[in-house]
Amino acid sequence: MTVSRTSSDAPFPVGGPERAPDATPPTVLIVDDEPDQLQLLSTYFQRAGCLVVPAIDAEHALNLPPGTRPELMVLDLRLPGIDGWELTERLRTLYPGCPIAITSVLDAADYPAAESVMPKPVTARDVRTLLRAAFPGRVR
């Protein structure tokens, strides 16, 4: 799904059984090698009521603290070292069923390994649209 900047009710396919809405803040892994972009995305997701796990590169994303389990992963495609495409595949193995949203200046709309695409520059509205679709009733 590409996040539409005009609609907030697009489907968000997630692997596994449906969960009842609850008040637990979703845990979101955000991976971006640009510190300003990582901070901006983290702020958007935190303001929407999420617990954010920031990672400046793929290595950090692949070595999260014990017990950390993201419920959504937001990845840039252009990363140093292990790029976003390879990182997507590795994270799918580590966290099966966890949806992935791609953020990129690249044309990632047809990238099959992601459930969502948010073209850069990402706005707070894009983040809220994504979260409402992914976590009905769990975010502001």
Image (cartoon, helix red, strand yellow):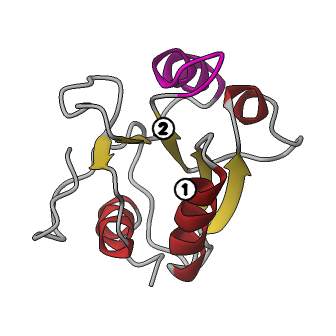
Please determine whether, in this image, residue 39 is positioned above or below residue 55: below
Please determine whether, in this image, residue 133 is positioned above or below residue 2: below
The percent coordinates of residue 100 (x first, y second) are 44, 39
Amino acid residing under circle 2: Asp
Q: Quote the CA–CA distance across marks 2 and 1.
A: 10 Å
Which residue is at a point 76% across and 26% down the rendered structure image?
59
The magenta segment: 79-94
Task: Say whether disc 2 or disc 1 marks the residue closer to the N-terminus.
Answer: 1
The percent coordinates of residue 103 (x first, y second) are 39, 44
The residue indicated by pointer 1 is 37
Mark 2, secondary structure of its residue: strand
The front one of 127 and 26 is 127
Amino acid residing under circle 1: Gln
The front one of 120 and 71 is 120
Mark 1, secondary structure of its residue: helix
Picture quadrant of residue 105: top left
Total numbered labels placed on residues in the image: 2
Which residue is at a point 47% across and 76% down the rendered structure image?
138
| Quarter of the N terminus within the rendering | top left
Which residue is at a point 53% across and 69% down the rendered structure image?
45
Do the residues under discs 2 and 1 have CB atoms within 8 angstroms? Answer: yes
Which residue is at a point 55% across and 66% down the rendered structure image?
40
Q: Is residue 125 left or right of residue 131?
A: left
The residue indicated by pointer 2 is 76
Q: Which mark is residue 93?
A: none
Asked whether residue 88 is drawn in magenta, I would say: yes
Q: Residues within 10 Å of mark 2 (few under 14, many from 20)?
A: many
Q: Is residue 134 left or right of residue 2?
A: right
